[in-house]
Image: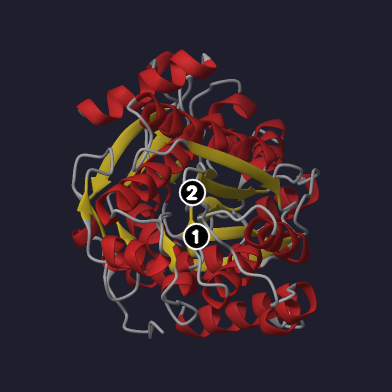
Amino acid sequence: MNELSRRRFLQLSVATGGALMFGDLIDRVLDLSGRAYAAGGEPIKIGILDPLSSPYKTSSIHDVHGANVAVDLFNKRGGVLGRPVAILEADDASNPEQALKVATKFIKEDHVDVLMGTFNADCALVVSELAKRENKLFVVTGSHLPELSGASCNSHTFVFMPHANMLAHAVVPHLVKAYGTRWYMITTSTLDGKAAAQAMLEAAEAHKVELVGEALMPFGSTDFLSALSAAKAKEPTAIILNLYGWDLVHALKGYGKLELAKEKIGVGGMISGEQIGRPLGYANNAGIWGLIWDPKINTESSKRFIQGVIDKYNHTPTSRCYLGYAAMTQILDAIQRAGSTETAALIKALEGHEFDGLKEGRSSFRASDHQHVQDVLVGEAFGKELGLGHYKILATVPGLANLGAADRHHCQLA
């Protein structure tokens, strides 16, 4: 298993490419002559970058929905530091060059106070480096790349999303218990896919999982029938989908079309969302998944958030709504506590800060690497019959009890 894990990691690394040099790309896009400023009495501006025109588009819209609900709540209370809060949105299109262009515009032309967002790992990495160079706080809400709070961490970036190791270590024991240890993986050939695959393999080592094969799929694939048929031929006990967004939806449609559940082949993966039941007609056997949040979390703060989304958008919030809402809440609360929008003051206000993360356990931003340490949920997807949300919650793994959440001391904040 160890040898196979290392080999697949190297193959995935080649598949995702190494040509993108983040520092060089920033130099091409960024004109360093301009600087942001904050004029007295102006709104506090938060610039959100999300992939509004990519396979993650539906999830990114929900990210903005959650952020808007949080801003509305603060503005109804008189704003922050006596100033209104305004959201600026931009589409990074899951493309790092586009992400840099819109982030640069946010800083140099729109004079935002804070950056947040991004789903794709390569977009998050380049915006993180830009934020450091331009002295802006950046809160990552969507990417699960462990390096963002590891080897590629920096002083100006905080990661709200649970990273791949946290999610994988939570879900793998439940996948093994339900489906056994003979796995086939279908992975998107991106940095995100590589991170998910490597985390799942690492977490699976202790359970003696045998990886019998893997298919690499281009980001944005719509036809997974060939990959799923190849998986079936290997006679796995489970197909692990290292996918998200519409890639995951299309793969699950193929899983349902081939009736692989009838073949006693389970399905699941590191991460999913509330849309999971729809491709399978809200049927049973829809898989076991790592979850960021779930609307059945029965805390007062979670219930207030749910009601806020229902009131504004007339839908039950998804986990991506949660990320937008909770991250925006922490940004604005940090500004209030710091008494300033100055980046250094905000970093100090967030480092080591413990807060209500709308989950059963407390959340905190670890001072050593700026990772949000939090509960991770594991759910079995069923569908509408469960009422609020589409999962039967199998476990809540507290942040500090999660082996994948351990500080690996790869981060050197600077």
Name the amino acid type tagged 2. Answer: Ile
Q: How crowded is mark 2: few (under 14 residues within 10 Å), some or many (20 or more)?
A: many
Give the quarter of the image for residue 301: top left
- In this view, the residue in front, 51 or 232, is 51
Classify the position of the C terminus by image quarter: bottom left
Name the amino acid type tagged 1. Answer: His
- In this view, the residue in front, 262 or 123, is 123
Question: Horizontal placement of 331 versus 127: left or right?
Answer: left
Q: How many numbered marks does the figure carry?
A: 2
Question: Horizontal placement of 91 versus 197: left or right?
Answer: right
Q: Mark 1 points at which residue?
A: 144
Q: Which of marks 2 and 1 is nearer the N terminus?
A: 1
Residue that appears at 58% across and 49% down: 47
Q: In the rendered structure, find residue 271 and report the number of the disc placed on it.
A: 2
Q: What element carries label 2?
A: loop
Looking at the image, can residue 371 be seen?
no
Give the quarter of the image for residue 246: top right
